[in-house]
Image (cartoon, rainbow, N blue to C red):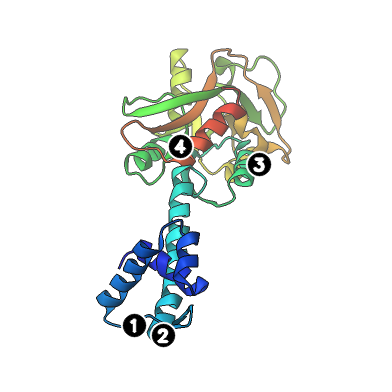
């Protein structure tokens, strides 16, 4: 017995007449009668009995009708859900964000949820290097990362350039350049061997400078407190400035024009990208005018 026969049987049970059931199913009466007979032969029981022109369900027929309704409904819902997932209307959006996540991301997620309310989310926060590994392991589909991307295995879209700010607890006088702040005790918003830590060190090195790094800290809340308490100053991209909005610190735009950070979205070239991820990627691209 297949799903098609179960559908036939539910219509026969509801119409209580083979001719009416056949019309509703857009088929002729003889083939439908043959399908009913075949079901009874396969099950070895009578499913209906006749009283005049009407069909009535036997006890076995009542049981089959009850289960047929559940099975056909589940099948229809399953097919609809598969279509929705395939169209990106349902499923899970799994993505990673850099430790210094893009501030407009929460608003974008809110807008995406309004358009696709059935989508669920898995959000992982980590350094870019770790996010690349999560992409390789297929734990996430997309990752908001800091550039550059050093491997050909990833596809990526660069979304935005952002300048750096020097943040310190006391007022600063004079120029704000890498050379003038190199001797200041610095707390970098990352840890050695990762993301912005190495980027910052390399930026100083290009000018033949060695920064006075006293701490690497990827916890931005703690970093802001340390800066406010005078533990050290910091050098952060514009995107991280929100953590200092309620602190008593002084902020200065770096005057080194080439000191910019780039962030964007990356994904594995060789892996299938779900329709949910594709739709989110397209929305993200539009949100930054890409």
Residue sticking out furthest to the bottom: 59
* Between discs 2 and 3, the one toward the N terminus: 2
Percent x, y of residue 178: 55, 17
Question: Alpha-carbon distance for marks 2 and 4?
Answer: 59 Å
Which residue corresponds to mark 4? 143
Work out whether 28 lies above or below 58: above
Q: Residues within 10 Å of mark 2 (few under 14, many from 20)?
A: some
* Between discs 2 and 4, the one toward the N terminus: 2
**Disc assigned to residue 46:** 1
* Between discs 2 and 1, the one toward the N terminus: 1
Q: Nearer the viewer, residue 121 or 63?
A: 63
Which residue corresponds to mark 3? 229
Discs 3/1, front: 1
Question: Alpha-carbon distance for marks 4 and 1?
Answer: 60 Å
* Between discs 3 and 1, the one toward the N terminus: 1
Question: Alpha-carbon distance for marks 2 and 1?
Answer: 7 Å
């Amino acid at each position: 017995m297949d799903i098609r026969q179960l559908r036939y049987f539910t219509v026969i049970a509801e119409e209580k007449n083979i001719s009416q059931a056949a019309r509703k199913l857009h088929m002729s009466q003889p083939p439908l009668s043959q399908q009913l007979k075949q079901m009874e032969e396969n099950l070895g029981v009578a499913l209906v009995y006749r009283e005049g022109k009407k069909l009535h369900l036997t006890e076995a027929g009542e049981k089959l009708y009850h289960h047929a309704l559940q099975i056909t409904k589940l099948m229809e819902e399953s097919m609809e859900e598969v279509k929705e997932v395939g169209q990106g209307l349902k499923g899970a959006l799994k993505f990673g964000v850099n430790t210094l996540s893009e501030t407009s991301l929460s608003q974008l997620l809110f807008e995406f949820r309004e358009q696709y309310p059935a989508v669920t989310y898995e959000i992982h926060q980590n350094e870019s290097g770790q996010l690349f590994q999560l992409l390789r392991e297929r734990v996430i589909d997309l990752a908001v990362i800091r550039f550059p991307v050093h491997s050909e295995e990833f596809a990526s879209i660069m979304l935005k350039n952002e300048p750096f700010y020097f943040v310190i607890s006391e007022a600063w006088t004079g120029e704000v350049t890498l050379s003038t702040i190199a001797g200041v005790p610095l707390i970098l918003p990352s840890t050695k061997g990762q993301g912005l830590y190495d980027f910052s060190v390399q930026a100083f090195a290009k000018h033949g400078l060695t920064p006075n790094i006293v701490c690497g800290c990827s916890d931005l809340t703690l970093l802001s407190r340390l800066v406010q308490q005078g533990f050290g100053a910091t050098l952060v991209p514009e995107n991280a400035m929100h953590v200092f909005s309620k602190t008593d610190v002084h902020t200065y735009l770096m005057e080194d024009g080439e000191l910019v950070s780039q962030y964007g979205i990356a994904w594995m070239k060789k892996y299938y990208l779900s329709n949910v991820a594709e739709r989110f990627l397209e929305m993200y691209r539009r949100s930054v005018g890409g």
